Image (cartoon, grey):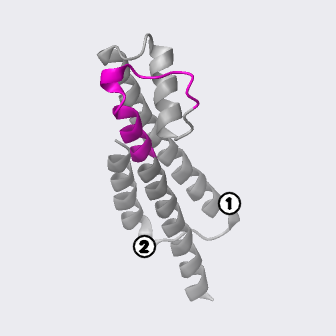
Amino acid sequence: MARYGIIVLLRAFRRWNAIAPTGFWPITRLLIFLVWCLMLCHLAEISIWGLFYLWSGSQPDAEAAFYFSGVTYASIGYGDLLLAKPWRVLAPIEGLTGILMCGLSASLFFAVVNRIHQSHHVKR
């Protein structure tokens, strides 16, 4: 889910590329907007995993399912909740997915900041 959100953001930023923001507040608003969009994408992915854990019965309730999903996706892995034996292989898969999606988000953020910096450097 996060990857589709990132694709939508990339397409939107390509369309908005013609006018790079100038000034402190427009750039700040753009970066805050980007961070919020990326966070929503990750929360959607965590929620999908959490719903799966709830649906499969591998977690006892919704709170545990979403908590486990968030902790695993962020690769924190407290270990206070575990999956049942048949489902254990999913935890490392979700953790790897989270690492990759967070890396992809960081690279998108870096690309936007780099583009803003380049557009200001060229104008001077």
Q: Position of residue 115 (x, y in %)?
A: 51, 74
Between 19 and 40, the residue placed more toward the observer is 40
Q: Is residue 64 magenta?
A: no
Between 28 and 89, the residue placed more toward the observer is 89
Q: Position of residue 37 (x, y in %)?
A: 48, 46
Range shown magenta: 78-98
Spatial distance from mark 2 to mark 1, Cα to Cα? Answer: 19 Å
Number of other residues with Cα within 10 Å of mark 2, as a class: few under 14, some 14 to 19, many 20 or more: few
Vertical comparison of 74 with 113: above or below? above
- Tell me the number on the disc at residue 25: 1
SS at mark 1 in the image: helix
Residue carrying label 2 = 18
- Disc 2 residue type? Ala
The first of marks 2 and 1 along the sequence is 2
Picture residue at 40% right of the left edge, 39% below the top:
92
Q: Position of residue 45 (x, y in %)?
A: 39, 37
- Disc 1 residue type? Trp
Q: Quadrant of the image for the N terminus?
A: top left
Q: Position of residue 50 (x, y in %)?
A: 40, 25
- Tell me the number on the disc at residue 44: none
SS at mark 2 in the image: helix
Picture residue at 42% right of the left edge, 73% below the top:
18
Q: Which residue is at the far front?
A: 85
